[in-house]
């Protein structure tokens, strides 16, 4: 599940949890406007990541929303909230050309 959070007039966070969100994280993690990244690890297994929270300035909200909506179909309410990430469907096997 992805969570878009508003933190006062200045900051915005995107929290990604679970394996379905890895595709979103792989796309947005190198976006240059993140000011902070917080990694939440499993207390019983430090090698396992439970969630990643990325924080940016609120002025980038329209750009982030556009990336999430166009790239992943994620639409959040005006005040943020939760949105389920649907993993992409498995591609159908292609048949080779007949000679």
Image (cartoon, helix red, strand yellow):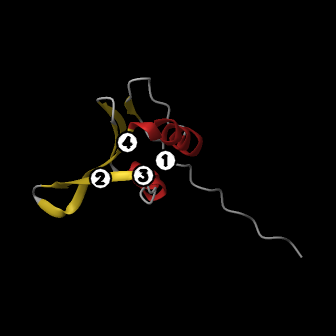
Identity of the residue furthest to the bottom in this view: 99
Q: Secondary structure at mark 3?
A: loop
Q: Secondary structure at mark 4?
A: strand
Taking the image as shown, residue 67 lies to the left or right of residue 4, namely: right
Separation (CA) of disc 4 from disc 3:
8 Å
Q: Earlier in the sequence, mark 4 or mark 3?
A: 3
Q: Residue beneath label 2, please?
A: 36
Q: Residue beneath label 4, please?
A: 57
The quadrant the N terminus occupies is top left
Separation (CA) of disc 4 from disc 2:
10 Å
Q: Position of residue 65 (x, y in %)?
A: 50, 37
Q: Residue at x 33, y 33 (%)?
A: 5
Q: Residue beneath label 3, please?
A: 33
Separation (CA) of disc 1 from disc 3:
25 Å
Q: Position of residue 70 (x, y in %)?
A: 59, 41
Q: Residue at x 46, y 53 (%)?
A: 28
Q: Residue at x 41, y 49 (%)?
A: 20
Identity of the residue furthest to the right in this view: 99
- Mark closer to the observer (4, 2): 4
Q: Is residue 22 above or below residue 14?
A: below
Separation (CA) of disc 2 from disc 1:
26 Å
Disc assigned to residue 87? 1
Tell whether label 3 touches label 1 (CB within 8 Å): no
Tell whether label 4 touches label 1 (CB within 8 Å): no
Q: Earlier in the sequence, mark 1 or mark 4?
A: 4
Pick whichever, 73 or 80, lies toward us: 80
Pick whichever, 6 or 69, lies toward us: 6
């Amino acid at each position: 599940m992805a969570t878009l959070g508003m933190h006062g007039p200045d900051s915005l966070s995107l929290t990604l949890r679970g394996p379905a969100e890895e595709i979103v994280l792989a796309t947005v993690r190198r976006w240059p406007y993140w000011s902070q990244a917080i990694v939440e690890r499993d207390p019983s297994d430090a090698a396992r990541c439970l969630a990643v929270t990325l924080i940016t300035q609120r002025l980038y909200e329209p750009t982030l929303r556009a990336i999430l909506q166009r790239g992943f179909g994620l639409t959040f309410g005006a005040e943020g909230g939760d949105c389920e990430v649907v993993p992409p469907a498995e591609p159908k096997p292609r048949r080779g050309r007949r000679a």
